[in-house]
Image (cartoon, helix red, strand yellow):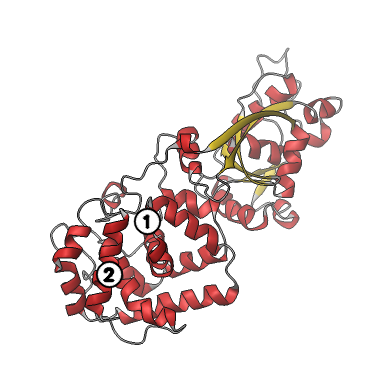
Amino acid sequence: MADDADNEWFEDYAEDADEIQIDEYDITASPNDFNVLTIYNFLEAGSVRIPGFQRNYVWDLGRASKLIESLLLGLPVPQIFLYESGRNQFLVIDGQQRLMSIYYFVKQRFPKKEKRGELRAIFDEHGIIPKEILEDDVYFDNFRLKLPESSVERPNRFKGLAYAVLGNYKTQFDLRTIRNVIIKQNSPQDDDSSMYEVFNRLNTGGINLKPQEIRMSLYHSSFYDMLYRANTNTAWRKIVAKAEPDLHMKDVEVLLRGLALLIDGANYAPSMLRFLNQFSRKNRANTEKQNAYLNGLLQSFFEACKSLPRDAFLNKKNRRFNVALYEAAFSAVCAKPFREGRLVAKPVVAGQLQKLENDEQFVSAATVSTTQTRNVKVRLERALALFGA
């Protein structure tokens, strides 16, 4: 299925018409001139993190070398944008290629193109590239500056140099400053929703990021690891009628939305985006036992749906996945098991699902203004009534 078609996969996508009013937040942008060595130390310490939705390192050796040469010569380079996600913790909004070029040059190793996806996963897991990986020629070549020369008579003085052999230029390079603009949300402190506008305005690359792509980075935790694994479950892929996980993580968001409405639906208030953010933030503190139970609950619901037709959660007219139907059915089926701390034991009956899908009140509440409080609660109430929970 093409990516354009994927954009039409959902009957009701959680972002809806939700938009962030950025003037509701107290946000500051502070310029800081960090020298190269400080920037490298931030990366080495894991204080600066590359969000998961950002692309891999893509520069070639020539382009990375030109950046290093500019710093050696004292030429200006574009500023870097960082988001302060916590005390001495930053997310890169714009500038990943420059930052990683500096990191790799100081390490004196340049990543092989075919290994960059794997290296990105290693970097995300450890916060750094472990020494044994850096020294492995399967992953890296030596980083020696690849620079053009105007003529044989006028060789480029930096061509072929590595960080360790910069000589008198090493201190000059280490102390060269780069402007870093640090963006911080001062208030409200318990709602990071403005981050969506910050990322989308400063680093879209012409592509509108979906909320779940950003949410996976901002609130990454063992809870999200659990959701990510659940998203690959064969029975779940049958429910969403899509063999492969969605590139923009819409299916992960559906799982999140079902759990959020099951657990916190009584306190729901728009926007859905903000509601899911707050739920994600709260679940970062989950214990291993809590995540294991939620995983078991999801798996038991998937199992309970095994006898349903493959298109049970698809709109019969346009064949798009009906998120409103799924989240209501999930919440209703799981309501009593969740209250009692157990798993779903009874199968979901196709007839009950069809009654909900055709219920006039449910249809009305799922047709317009789908994320308004009244309509969300009507859908949940009708599902509870029809499923007899």
* Residue displayed at 58% across by 47% down: 189
Q: CA distance from mark 1 to mark 2?
A: 25 Å
The residue wearing badge 1 is: 250
**Within-10-Å neighbours for mark 2: few <14, some 14–19, many 20+:** some
Task: Tell me the residue that label 2 is attached to.
Answer: 381
Residue 181, position in %: x, y?
63, 31
Q: Position of residue 166 (x, y in %)?
A: 81, 29
Nearest the eye: 122 or 12: 12
Secondary structure, mark 2, is helix
Placement of 285 over or under 53, stated as above or below: below
Q: Quadrant of the N terminus?
A: bottom left
Q: Left of 95 or right of it: where is 369?
A: left
Residue 255 visible in this rendered orientation of the protein: no
Determine whether, in the image, residue 268 is placed left or right of residue 10.
right
| Marker disc for residue 39 | none
Bin the neighbour count of mark 1 within 10 Å (Cα to Cα): few under 14, some 14-19, many 20 and up: many
Image quadrant in which the C terminus is located: bottom left
What residue do we see at 15% from left, 68% from top? 359
Give coordinates of residue 145: x percent, y percent: 70, 31
Q: Amino acid at mark 2?
A: Glu
Q: Earlier in the sequence, mark 1 or mark 2?
A: 1
Query: Which residue is at the far bottom?
Result: 345
Q: Is residue 8 visible?
A: yes
**In the rendered image, the vertical position of residue 388 relative to residue 103, given as above or below:** below
Residue at image coords 48%, 52%: 215
User: In the figure, 290 relative to 91: above or below?
Assistant: below
Q: Residue at x 26, y 65 (%)?
A: 379
Residue 240 spot, x, y in % from top left = 30, 66
**Quarter of the rendering containing residue 260:** bottom left
- Circle 1 SS class: helix
The amino acid type found where label 1 is placed reads Lys
